[in-house]
Amino acid sequence: MVSGLALAGSTGCGRGSTGEASAESGGGGTLTILAASSLTDAFGQLARIFQKQNSGSKVKMSFGASSDLLTQIQQGAPADVFASAAEEEMDTAVKQGLVSGKPEVFVKNREVVMVPKDNPANIKSFKDVSKPNVKLVLAEEGVPAADYAVEILGKADKEYGPGFKKKVLSNVVSREADVRASVNRVVVGDADATFGYASDYTPDIRDRVKVIPIPPNLNIVATYPVATLKDAKSPDLAQKWIDLVTGEEGQRVLKKWGFEPSA
């Protein structure tokens, strides 16, 4: 029997957002996971599957920007698994000796532009995000989703002419803690547009936002690595989690939530 906080359907995951899916007592141990905010819904569902497969186990999760999670790990935050939305943060963790074993890329993602359903800025194509007076919200600098957005805009400069990137970035009115927080600003109508992941277009927000595709030749492929941390208190459970997310059942769940297979 699984109880605790349901994670699926969360749209406003900010800095340090946490969730816990707990099982009845059975002495199965506790698994603590630090994961990119874009994984909130998929990992919430996988936590419940994991606990059914590992009787008596308890999964604790903290979601946020991958850069913030790396900082927490560097500062000694107790955790067993790190799942990042970019390889840069994981590479840093590896170089600093914070990871046990070799990280595995378990899923991929792509970016989209999201706008409110009523689309007050009349954004009909990706190019329209450069129009004057568009209220654009991004995640903070250093957050993978924001870094990917800047990379996309750099490519777009070559497609649409020099100055496109500058025009878009001049429309930024707010920087949010992570990608889920920036998407939530669009959901509640505080912004005209944001860059998010395809996986952030979750069923619970589809009646309030719509997606503006980014041309494939301009888009990026975000790769998500996962690894057991060196100071893990439950390394066996950590490996079982990695086996789940990289296995057939885990990949099926991740696909359901808008992710692409790693292969």
Image (cartoon, grey):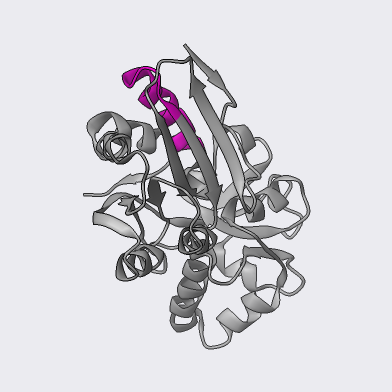
Q: Position of residue 132 (x, y in %)?
A: 73, 75
State the extent of the magenta-drawn residues as a range.
41-58
Q: Position of residue 51 (x, y in %)?
A: 39, 22
Image quadrant where residue 168 sits: bottom right
Q: Residue at x 53, y 88 (%)?
A: 162
Q: Residue at x 51, y 64 (%)?
A: 71
Q: Is residue 52 magenta?
A: yes
Q: Where is 151 relative to 220, above or below?
A: below
Q: Residue at x 51, y 62 (%)?
A: 75
Q: Where is 256 relative to 222, above or below?
A: above
- Camera-side residue: 249 or 186? 249
- Camera-side residue: 197 or 51? 51
Magenta segment, principal secondary structure?
helix
203 horizontally vs 249: left or right: right
Residue at the top extreme?
Answer: 1
123 horizontally vs 53: left or right: right
Residue at the bottom extreme?
Answer: 162
Image quadrant where residue 110 sits: bottom left
Q: Is residue 257 visible?
A: no
Q: Residue at x 76, y 46 (%)?
A: 188
Q: Position of residue 176 (x, y in %)?
A: 67, 61
Q: Is residue 263 magenta?
A: no
Q: Position of residue 115 (x, y in %)?
A: 65, 53
Q: Where is 169 relative to 84, above or below?
A: below
174 horizontally vs 90: left or right: right
